[in-house]
Image (cartoon, rainbow, N blue to C red):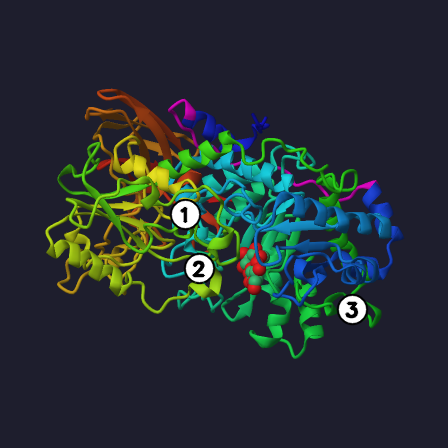
Amino acid sequence: MIKFQRKTRGFFSLLLLLLLFGSCQNTEQERVEQPVASDVEVEKLISEMSLVDKVGQMTQLTLDMVLVGPPYGAVEPQRIDSSLLRKVIVDLRVGSILNCGGHTYPRSFWNETIKTIQDLSMSTNGIPVLYGIDAIHGVNYTDSATLFPQQIGLAATWNPDIVRELAEITAYETRASSIPWNFSPVLDIGRDVRWPRLWETFGEDPYLASTLATAMIEGYQGDDISDETKVASCMKHFLGYSQTLTGKDRTQAWIPERQLREYFLPTFEAAIDAGAKTVMVNSGEINGIPVHVNSWVLKDLLRDELGFDGLIVTDWEDIKYLVSRHRVAVDYKEAIKMAIDAGIDMSMVPVDYDFPVLLRELVEEGEIEESRLDESVRRILTLKKELGLFDSPYPELYTHSEFASEASRQKSELAAKQSITLLKNEAGILPLADGADVFVDGPNADNLMALNGGWSHTWQGTDPQYNTPGKSTVKDLMPGGSANSKYIVLCLGESPYTEKVGDIEDITLAQDQLDLVKDYADKGKKIIVVLLEGRPRIISEIEPLCDAIVMAYLPGDEGAEAIRSVLFGEFNPEGKLPFTYPRHPSSHTTYDHKYTDRLDPQFGANAFQPQYEFGHGLSYTSFEYSDLVITKDSVNFDEDIEISISIENTGSISGRETVMLFVSDSVASITPSVKRLRSYQKIGLAAGEKKTCNFKLNSRDLAFVGRDLDWISEPGDFIVRIGGLSEVFYMKGEDNKVFE
Ligand code: BGC
Ligand code: BGC
């Protein structure tokens, strides 16, 4: 068994503990002080470093730059080109390398490659290289690693505990591949379902995403990242990346500061509180300013206000793109100056050798102070030191005997099961009886890649030759009926994509898939649709033809068994949608919309008609909510609001339910949302069992960002809504309460 260290710190750990015991408490979040990066050894090292050493530390190249063959075209079998490696490490003193040479590698390749790099770096200037990778659903670039559901599926579990456990396993398997730095989690809020990276997020709600972000970071980092089972996490992509006007990747965003603070900042704030060590910058622009040159975002907000003292890395090639895409700099050198001035510490260059040369010139020409480089180098060296890389630049080969263990596989399967969300179950057609006559069809039925999505063995996740051997597709595990079978299970959705490649012109499910459903409907079949997709594709045309609809997201290598066990009732579904599933292509509205968003053309209030609501998810049992009680009718700003509710399992099998607490602010100085998620608990109930859940909120939990851009809470009526019940309490006070 892997021995995972548990960290018990701060508010969210308390939340987790209380979740376990079926009671939940919200308290003021306490900020964990970031370590001040000043350390005698680090300072000594900086004082001895040359300018070449310093600019090198701030440079990150992709692995291709030291492999035989051109960038994006490493020659197979892949191997290090020793003259390129000398150029990169000895001449340029490059401090960081990332990525894989296009596809997944065996652990032995990772270990040997990184050992070669580290040995040369240590013998050159005694500074280890910081290797980083996107291990976003398990260490997806190492052969046979445990692959988990993608983040959107994890969000559907509403279970911080399992998110933490998976992150622990990911950290372990990443370190087992000799890599100490993980470009995860994505903390962008997925409020535009067209966005091709929606599946990399924890969904549309900042509170749910913040609780899961905290769990993930604690799982990755533990108490001590020098432990060779832990990695440094990387919050990405700061800030406002997900909310583009077009819904397409890396296009412009217009986000007023108030909304930026209220919806897009909280996940990062929670992650910093949880001790996240690094952050990656948003490739895009907000309000006309590329974030890579926006010192207000990177300094005022991130450093000064949030107190983040860790490493800021650019995203892929983004300094160059300031010239070629964003057109805010005339040439690469000017772009470097702008990005350094804005506050970046390390450039993910990653496919040219010019960055360190030009940065050095800028210092020699007096355009950038050397002391400015020292600040960044200090952060980089401090991180390397905290990771224990000076003492042990790579683990010995095969120290990590629990790599891809059976226990880890089981955790992945459990997470996939917990993520699966039963959207529709007409006349209780599911679960299927043992021996039911079932035929499985659809483009994603016999496709392992469709279970994993992007960032799986290759960047796009579309090359089957790297699939983990022995993993099953849905078709592999389901009974093999014929097209004449009574029940047709149709695996529909999307094919894998990552980033820009996933931009779409139409959010509707592909026409051939809609037609497939209609064909089977014409034949009078019982239709069960399983959706394997990274974002909700519109299904309103065929939804009435389906007897059951199961949302599986991108459940990973164990997804097929998870789907099978849900279809046959061996696992009672408990997933809940972490986003609003739209009904119409031009009508996507989040659950926490404003009252005006409900106005319909008949001047009624029926415009909000999503296919399925945020938080929706059926079970094979039934839960009845009763006795919603708020202990006091009115409270003042300093008092806790205590709320209790009873939930009874009124069905005949055990099940797990996510109890969601929403609050509506009746009247406010900023138009209030119809409701906001303010807390949740996940509980298990045996058949017939009844439990009481207790919640405690305070005025900060009800706060919003006001006209002066502060978090405030206002006196007045608030409506607490849980499971279809509601109760009102009054917040007393002369003035608004302003929070720091
Ligand atoms: C993506 C990041 C990723 C980085 C390194 C970028 O294109 O936007 O999410 O971490 O590449 O692979
Ligand atoms: C991705 C990298 C990927 C590269 C391949 C980038 O945008 O983030 O991780 O390997 O493109 O072209």
Q: Is residue 597 visible?
A: yes
Question: Mark 2 = which residue?
Answer: 497
Taking the magenta stretch, the answer to whether it contains residue 281 is: no
Question: Mark 3 = which residue?
Answer: 357
- Check disc 3 and give the amino acid type: Val
- Check disc 2 and give the amino acid type: Tyr
- Say few, some or many: other residues with alpha carbon within 10 Å of mark 2 (under 14 / 14 to 19 / 20 or more): many
Instruction: Classify residue 585 by image quadrant.
Output: bottom left
Q: Marks 3 and 2: in contact by CB < 8 Å?
A: no
- Range of magenta residues: 20-40
Q: Nearer the viewer, mark 2 or mark 3?
A: 2
Q: Quadrant of the N terminus?
A: top right
Q: Is residue 274 visible?
A: no
- Which SS does the magenta portion mostly show? loop
Instruction: Classify residue 68 by image quadrant.
Output: bottom right
Q: CA distance from mark 2 to mark 1?
A: 15 Å
Q: Position of residue 20 (x, y in %)?
A: 42, 25
Question: In terms of image quarters, where does ligand 1 lie?
Answer: bottom right
Q: Circle 1 sits in a helix, a strand or a loop, which is it?
A: helix
